[in-house]
Amino acid sequence: MRILVAEDNPLNQKIISTFLGRNNHDVIMAKDGLEAVELFQQYEFDCILMDLHMPNMDGFQATEAIRSIQKGMKIPIIAVTASSPLEDKSNCIGAGMNDFIQKPVQYIDIEFILQRVESGYYTIN
Ligand SMILES: [Mg+2]
């Protein structure tokens, strides 16, 4: 799959890229929400992994922007959050995200989410 990753932290960028590379996914990295929105408009992606806290434009704002510009089938957007998922869950869903992964990011969690993406779980529900 082709995956857009919006993440400002270089270490997290590297970890996520490494995990995705294990299964030969195509990764395009955005350093903030603004760049993520621009890349979303330029290329086709199968899903987006979205850090919540980024400079210039955060994950909530970027998700809202993407949801407002896209037409047709909705791309799965997965929040990547360092805070409690329960705390962020309603905000994530409210902004238009489909699911979330807790930091520090674990390979097994990414795999679980990507299997859901591939099975159409987020586009059916
Ligand atoms: Mg961040």
Image (cartoon, rainbow, N blue to C red):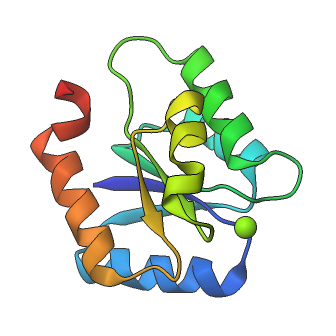
Q: Residue at x 37, y 24 (%)?
A: 74
- Residue 81: give x, y in percent of width and height: 58, 64
47 relative to 113 in the view: left or right: right
* Residue 49 higher or lower than 96, as above or below: below
Q: Residue at x 10, y 45 (%)?
A: 119
In this view, the residue farthest toward the left is: 119
* Residue 70 higher or lower than 23, as above or below: above
Taking the image in four quarters, ligand 1 sits in the one at bottom right
Location of the C terminus by quadrant is top left
Residue in front for this viewpoint, 29 or 58: 58
Q: Residue at x 37, y 63 (%)?
A: 26
Q: Residue at x 23, y 47 (%)?
A: 117
- Residue 36: give x, y in percent of width and height: 65, 46
- Residue 51: give x, y in percent of width and height: 62, 59
Residue 92 appearing in the image:
yes
81 relative to 45 in the view: left or right: right
* Residue 111 higher or lower than 61, as above or below: below
67 relative to 71 in the view: left or right: right
- Residue 52: give x, y in percent of width and height: 67, 55
Q: Quadrant of residue 39?
A: top right
Residue in front for this viewpoint, 27 or 91: 91
In this view, the residue farthest toward the front is: 86
Count of numbered badges drawn on the protein: 0
Residue 50 appearing in the image:
no
83 relative to 28 in the view: left or right: right
* Residue 7 higher or lower than 118, as above or below: below
Residue in front for this viewpoint, 64 or 102: 102
